[in-house]
Image (spheres, rainbow, N blue to C red):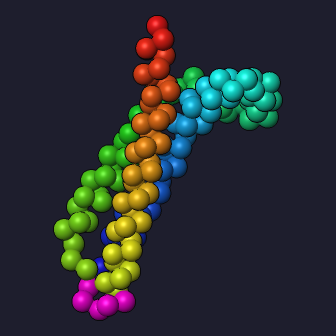
Amino acid sequence: MNAPLRRNAALAFVALLASSGTLVCCVLPAVMVALGTGAVLAGLVSAIPQLIWLSEHKSLVFGVAAALLAIAGVAIMRARRYACPADPDLAHTCVRLRRISAMLYAVALLTFCAGAAFAFVLPWLAA
C-alpha cells in the first residue's frame, strides 16, 4: 500500500529538483546582480558554463518543470483517495508519506512561482 505513496514522495522530490532549476536559471543571476555581486556571478558562470544554457533555454526549463509539477500534483491528488492500512505503524507511515509528499510539492510550487516571477513577470513589468 505504501508503494504509491513512496512513488508520490519521489515524484514530488523530482518536481522540486526541476523547479529548483528555475531558480538557478533565473532567480540566482537576478539576485546576485541586484546585490552588486556581478563579479561573483561572472566567476560562477565561468566555473559552471551550463548556467548560461539554462538561461538561454528558460522556456524549456520551465516547461519541463511545469510538466513534472502537473504529473506530481495529479499523483498526489489521486493518492488522497487511498485508505491507509489498519496497522498503526503502517498507518503512521502512510500519513507521514502523505505529509512529506504534500510539503515537497508545496515547496516545489513556490520555487516554480518564484522562478517564473523573476523570468517572465518582472522583465515584462520593467518593459
Q: Is residue 23 left or right of residue 96?
A: right
Residue 64 placement (x, y as % from top left)? 43, 39
Residue 86 highlighted magenta (yes or no)? yes
Residue 22 position, x and y percent, is: 52, 36
Q: Nearer the viewer, residue 103 or 36?
A: 36
Q: Nearer the viewer, residue 112 or 45?
A: 112
Q: Which residues are magenta?
A: 85-89
The answer to whether one can see residue 7 in this image is no
Q: Quadrant of residue 31?
A: top right
Figure label count: 0
Instruction: Give the percent coordinates (x, y) of residue 104.
Output: 44, 57
- The residue shown at (43%, 14%) is 125
Quadrant where the image shows the N terminus: bottom left
Q: In the picture, residue 109 is in which quadrant?
A: top left
Task: Please tell me whether the stretch drawn in magenta is mainly helix, strand or loop.
Answer: loop
Furthest toward the bottom, the residue is 87
* Magenta highlight on residue 38: no
Name the spot of residue 47 as percent of width and height, x first. 79, 34
Report the front residue among 20 and 124.
124
Q: Give whichever of 45, 100 is nearer the camera.
A: 100
Query: Residue at point 49% right, 33% down?
Result: 115
Instruction: Left or right? Give the position of 54 relative to 42.
Output: left
Q: Is residue 27 above or below residue 92?
A: above
